């Protein structure tokens, strides 16, 4: 019993340190840019030794990848919470609301969206570890893939959903960040209606 408690405490401390490094990296990446940020600066801001960094991350690319996963997972978790408190007439309606919530959230958080760039779709198909922090991404993907009632096979549906996420990620980024091909207020209804047609084939 005592050993289990000590093990949990050690695990909690590890998560806290990892999150401090991730938060420090995000702050510096936003402030200075990814290329201009050194690992030395990240550990200094996080208040940990440089050796601690390498207990959690291989290099700067690794912390960037995990940071994108973390930030994306946080957004997905919020979207799933909103989905869970509402009733929908179909899985397609549920999926469209999920997407709309994410689009609206990113519209209000442009700095975050610029950081994520167009990688939001990638996180759903990157190999997600068993780390509990990223469990929401896995849960969202599985929930929607299992519940769609379409003429697609499971394999085809995986490809279709990936295509949809790529479309949403790329088009909303261009619209929100660059106002191209039009502001998001005009793009969003057309985008969602197009996705509905794809899924209700």
Image (spheres, helix red, strand yellow):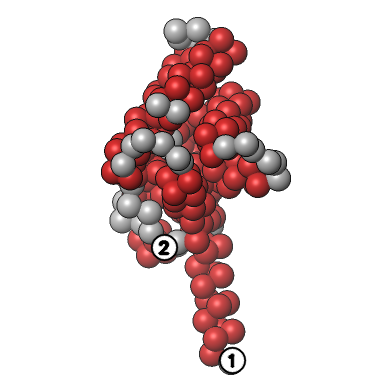
Question: Which label is found at residue 108?
Answer: none
Looking at the rendered image, the quarter that the C terminus falls into is top left
Q: Is residue 145 visible?
A: yes
Neighbourhood count class around disc 1 (C-alpha, 10 Å): few under 14, some 14–19, many 20 upward: few
- Up the image or down, 122 lies above or below 22; here it is above
Q: Residue at x 51, y 73 (%)?
A: 11
Q: Residue at x 57, y 77 (%)?
A: 9
Q: Quadrant of residue 12?
A: bottom right
Task: Identify the residue at the far right of this view.
Answer: 85
User: Percent from the top left, x then y, of residue 41?
Assistant: 45, 46
Task: Tell me the SS state at disc 2.
Answer: loop
- Up the image or down, 32 lies above or below 67; here it is above
- Up the image or down, 176 lies above or below 157; here it is above
**Would you name the residue on which mark 1 appears?**
2
Q: Is residue 25 visible?
A: no
Task: Identify the residue at the far front of this view.
Answer: 151
User: Percent from the top left, x then y, of residue 123?
Assistant: 39, 43
Q: Is residue 87 left or right of residue 163?
A: right
Looking at the rendered image, the quarter that the N terminus falls into is bottom right
């Amino acid at each position: 019993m005592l050993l289990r408690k000590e093990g949990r405490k050690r695990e909690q401390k590890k998560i806290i340190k990892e999150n401090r490094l991730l938060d420090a990296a995000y702050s510096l990446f936003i402030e200075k840019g990814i290329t201009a940020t050194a690992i030395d600066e990240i550990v200094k801001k996080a208040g940990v030794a440089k050796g601690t960094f390498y207990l959690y991350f291989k290099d700067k690319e690794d912390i960037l990848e995990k940071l994108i996963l973390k930030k994306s997972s946080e957004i997905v978790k919020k979207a799933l919470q909103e989905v869970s408190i509402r009733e929908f007439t179909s899985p397609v309606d549920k999926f469209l609301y999920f997407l709309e919530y994410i689009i609206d959230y990113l519209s209000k958080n442009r700095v975050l969206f610029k950081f994520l760039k167009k990688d939001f779709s990638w996180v759903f198909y990157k190999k997600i570890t068993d780390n509990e922090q990223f469990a929401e991404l896995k849960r969202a993907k599985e929930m929607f893939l299992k519940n769609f009632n379409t003429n697609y096979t499971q394999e085809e549906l995986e490809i279709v959903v990936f295509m949809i996420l790529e479309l949403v990620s790329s088009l909303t980024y261009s619209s929100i960040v660059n106002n191209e091909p039009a502001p998001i207020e005009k793009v969003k209804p057309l985008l969602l209606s197009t996705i509905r047609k794809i899924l209700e084939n």
